[in-house]
Image (cartoon, rainbow, N blue to C red):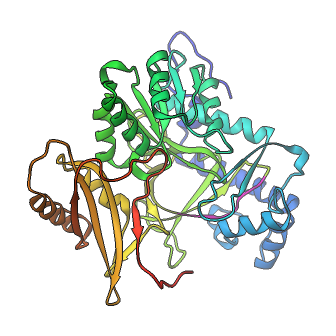
Amino acid sequence: MTIQLSGTEQRYWAPALETQSREEWESLKLALLQKHLAHAYAGSRWYRDSFDRAGVTPLSLNSLDDLARFPFIDKRILRERQEAEPLLGDLAAVPERDVVYISASSGSTGVPTVSPFTARDFDAWQDFEARLFWSSGLRPHDRYCHSLNFSLFVGGPCVLGAQKLGALCIHAGTVPSERLLAILRQFQATAIWTTPSYAWYLGETAQKEGIDPRRDLAVRRIFVAGEPGGSIPETRERIESLWGAKVYDYYGLSDIFGACAGMCEERDGLHWAEDHILTEVLDPATGEPVREGERGELVLTTLQKRARPLIRFRTGDIVSFTSEPCRCGRTSQRLLGVHGRLDDMLIIRGVNLFPSDVEAVVRQDGDFSGEYRLVVERHDHLDSVTVEAERRHGVNTHPDDLAARLTRRLKAITGVGARVTVLAPDTLPRATHKAKRVDDRRTGLWTT
């Protein structure tokens, strides 16, 4: 799908699709899903056996609600099936000769898993990336610097979406910070994509080198992904203040494709790739759907990806959604935030706590630098959490007073009675990719 510009610049990349009614969205998804299940059943031996064991076939689906009858898959299954039949695994629904590109996960939670694409899959992915960039205000006159990893990382090729809409693209990759700042300065890039932690770190590094990002650089749009921070107002505002630029949060998944959702210029949630990926938000304990706007585990089903369909893939991400139309006029579902992961969730004396909950409180207080870490320990069979937070340069308030204030706010907002330790500026390590926010020192824990 290529946008056709007339005398007046078009507001939407795909106007009819992006502004259709909710009834039209539901009808489209049902038609795509029925066709996709048939493709998975016919092309993948694993899906065929899995569906048969569950007593379902593609013909069992007559409404979107019927998808609940189909079995889940998860990251463990992806790894097992890939190891059983390297390279692509028996979830793949096309022969290897039809695959033109593969990405791979980082392997941070196990063996790296491959994500294959046919030529049609790849083109459809880049068209959606262009749609997202367009909704975020990127235009052909922009100079876009892509500073994500290109080495098997699914976010690398997203730069082609920016090229598709006509922006001048700089394939910087993950170069050292000093080199990236030199690139931004030399080419006066107007947009950049990185992680929230690195956007913060890069801005601080610029200041230490005597560069004022607001005055000396031309960056006015920062796309961020990989961490929850981009949808946390306090984090977004601090990065924007540092750069004098607007931050747009994007969400991607290595097992499907790069950015699956992103903020439009209203920046009120992330518009979802609803014509490519069906969403379910389920209670992790019961598997039942939660009410719209409530938090639950994100379960995804591809609708068009032919190389390797994913049917009811449990992501482990804790999210919330709305289907209310956006002020921009787009009607697709919006991701309201990735609040954390099931494997990051802490239960402190019966209260669920995510690092993102703490981040919102710490970064609201201007006396702190914004860097923080949660230290989890167990004493006498009870779990406790200590929040280590850096004070900002030039703040002379006594550390005990800062700690008491932050303790009160954390208790009021999260319901958790945490111990707070105030650290000197620049004590905590700065992240050049994803920040590690939890130091779990408990031993002898049961795992599943």
Residue 313 against residue 181 in the figure, above or below: below
Which residue is nearer to you in this view: 297 or 380? 380
Q: Position of residue 30 (x, y in %)?
A: 67, 54
Say whether residue 135 is left or right of residue 430: right
* Residue sitting at x 63%, y 38%: 156
Which residue is nearer to you in this view: 154 or 112? 112
* Residue sitting at x 37%, y 40%: 200
Give the mark count: 0
Q: Is residue 311 magenta?
A: yes
Q: Which of the 4 image quadrants contains residue 100?
A: top right
Tell me which segment is drawn in magenta: 308-316
The quadrant of the rendering that contains the N terminus is top right
Q: Residue furthest top?
A: 7
Residue 7 against residue 387 in the figure, above or below: above
* Residue sitting at x 62%, y 23%: 3
Which residue is nearer to you in this view: 351 or 210? 210
Q: Position of residue 157 (x, y in %)?
A: 65, 36
Say whether residue 163 is left or right of residue 436: right
Say whether residue 349 is left or right of residue 249: left
* Residue 304 shows in the view: yes
Q: Position of residue 102 (x, y in %)?
A: 75, 46
Residue 194 against residue 323 in the figure, above or below: above
* Residue sitting at x 55%, y 17%: 140
Q: Is residue 301 magenta?
A: no
* Residue 137 shows in the view: no
The quadrant of the rendering that contains the C terminus is bottom right
Q: Position of residue 168 (x, y in %)?
A: 57, 18
Q: Residue furthest bottom?
A: 380
